[in-house]
Image: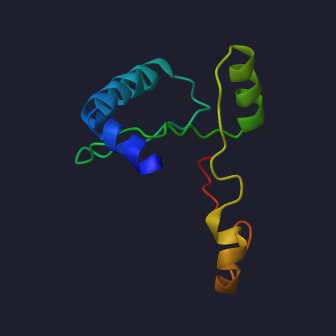
Amino acid sequence: MQAAILRVKLKYLEEFNEERKMIAQIYLKGLQDKSLILPYVPEWAEPVWHQFVIRTKKRNELQEYLKSKGIGTLIHYPLPIHLQEAYKRLGYKKGDFVDSSC
């Protein structure tokens, strides 16, 4: 069933990608808060903006603020990959990949 639905949607993929690119440009121009870390796009890259990831030290506060404005958010990876059970054997621990900018 899912394959049948996606087969139909595939016809519109370029259109969907273009729309997401336009929306991402609006976000990049409009979000000027210094406490936010916005997506970085190298000159050679052309993302399709499947996700628009914003990082901040005040994640919960930002999420609540956006919710109060009717804007939904998701935390796609609440547990980093290196801390998930499937990768436990690699021996990484919390803090091994901390980004000091966030």
Q: Indicate the quadrant where residue 90 lies.
A: bottom right
Q: Position of residue 84 (x, y in %)?
A: 70, 69
Q: How is the image coloured?
A: rainbow
Q: Nearer the viewer, residue 22 or 43?
A: 22
**Residue at 62% over, 32% down:** 35
> x and y percent of residue 46 in the render?
27, 43
Q: Is residue 50 left or right of residue 21?
A: right
Q: Residue furthest top?
A: 69
Using the image, determine if residue 5 lies above or below residue 71: below
The answer to which of 44 and 51 lies nearer the viewer is 51
* Residue 56 visible: yes
Please indicate whether residue 2 sits to the left or right of residue 13 in the image: right
- Residue located at (33% from left, 38% from top): 8
Give the residue at the far left of this rendering.
Answer: 44
Q: Name the spot of residue 56 as percent of width and height, x first.
A: 65, 38
**In screen coordinates, is 88 left or right of 27?**
right
Drawn side of residue 71 relative to residue 29, left or right: right
Residue 22 percent coordinates (x, y): 34, 23
Residue 58 in sight in this render = no
- The answer to which of 43 and 66 lies nearer the viewer is 66
Numbered-mark total:
0
Q: Residue at x 65, y 26 (%)?
A: 72
Q: Is residue 70 above or below residue 73?
A: above
